[in-house]
Image: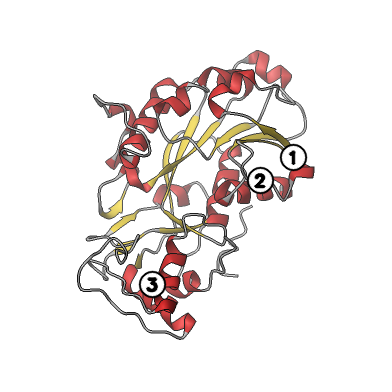
Amino acid sequence: APFDSGFISDSVLSQRKPTMKTVLILGGGRFVGKSFVEKALEAGYSVTVITRGRSVLPFADRVHHLIADRRNLKQVHLPTRHYDAVVDTCAYDVEDFTAIAPTIGEITQRYIVASSQSVYAPGSALTEDMFVPDEHSWTLVADRHSDYAEAKRQLESTVARLSPVPWVTLRFSMIVGPDDYTRRLLWHRNRIESGLPIFMPNRSARLSFLHQHDAARTMLDMITSTTVGPINVASPLPLAVGPMAEALAAKTGHTIEWGSSPTTESASPYGIEDDWWMDTSRLQSEGVKIPPYTVHDLANIDHRV
């Protein structure tokens, strides 16, 4: 299988640490969070999942599932008072972190948060030092709806400055997979099969991609890692967006009608003007192996949502 890469604070807290491996995940009901829970269970972890209760968990009988608002974490009755790590898949802005920071300091010594390639401006071979979170400053607080990229920058900056425990921010690239609720890849397939135009300003522009299972495996690896700071997480091989769409067309037996100008309906969610992909040397130095995907690998993804 092309994506089966085989991955597998104080002294008082240390004294409380149980022999069983434990992890708390914020947002484990869908997409990458769901994949992470499945991988953590396979690896023998006792998993506590906190969600808003909007998704049915296929593994509900094998986890501690708590329905709660993540920003009221201190009021949640947890099944244990020590976790090997807190994995956060649904932090998008400053308040998402500041609301839980005191509790994190009480229950774990490791905080792993999903960030995004969006912290970078477009470019090639983007490295972690191209955005240094503790050097970032802002005047207005952003949120995911007003400015997703800036909200993620502010989130990373706040984690870097205020986290009470060692932390890692995983800068995920464009994530794909069968549980992708954004349906970005599926959008292309549906347009192609319906004979509707697709507009991309630069079909040769290359983009970083990441399968949801490799994202989950990376988070799992980070539980036992001692690294601190940001890490780019992507397949080492960026893909040109035009050939990616062409592979989808070939898979379905259709041809693409390329639009000559953008409209609200025809503008591709992968329609970038310039290369936008990350260097993953640091990830590889951590021993995390993500395979180089091909456009055919993406075309072969069967969506479940």
- In the picture, the disc for residue 12 is none
Q: Secondary structure at mark 1?
A: loop
Q: Which residue is rendered at x = 53% and y = 25% of the image?
A: 71
Pick whichever, 197 or 241, lies toward us: 197
**Residue 40 horizontal side relative to residue 296, left or right:** right
Q: Which residue is rendered at x = 43% and y = 65% of the image?
A: 187
Is the residue 30 above or below the residue 12 in the image?
A: below
Q: Which residue is rendered at x = 57% and y = 57% of the image?
A: 179
Amino acid carrying mark 2 in the image: Val
Is the residue 75 above or below the residue 124 in the image?
A: above
Amino acid carrying mark 1 in the image: Val
**Residue 23 horizontal side relative to residue 104, left or right:** right
Q: Which mark sits nearer the N-terminus, 3 or 2?
A: 2
Q: CA distance from mark 1 to mark 2?
A: 9 Å
Q: Which residue is rendered at x = 33% and y = 68% of the image?
A: 241
- Its colouring scheme is secondary structure
Q: Which residue is mark 3?
A: 244
Q: Which residue is mark 1?
A: 63
Q: Do the numbered discs 1 and 2 sit on residues whose CB atoms are within 8 Å?
A: yes
Outermost top residue: 12
Amino acid carrying mark 3 in the image: Met
Q: Name which quarter of the figure residue 137 lies in.
A: top left
Q: Do the numbered discs 3 and 2 sit on residues whose CB atoms are within 8 Å?
A: no
Categorize mark 2 by other alpha carbons within 10 Å: few (<14), some (14-19), many (20+): many
User: Could you tell me which quadrant the N terminus lies in?
Assistant: bottom right
x, y percent for residue 96: 46, 28
Q: Which mark sits nearer the N-terminus, 1 or 2?
A: 2
- In the picture, the disc for residue 37 is 2
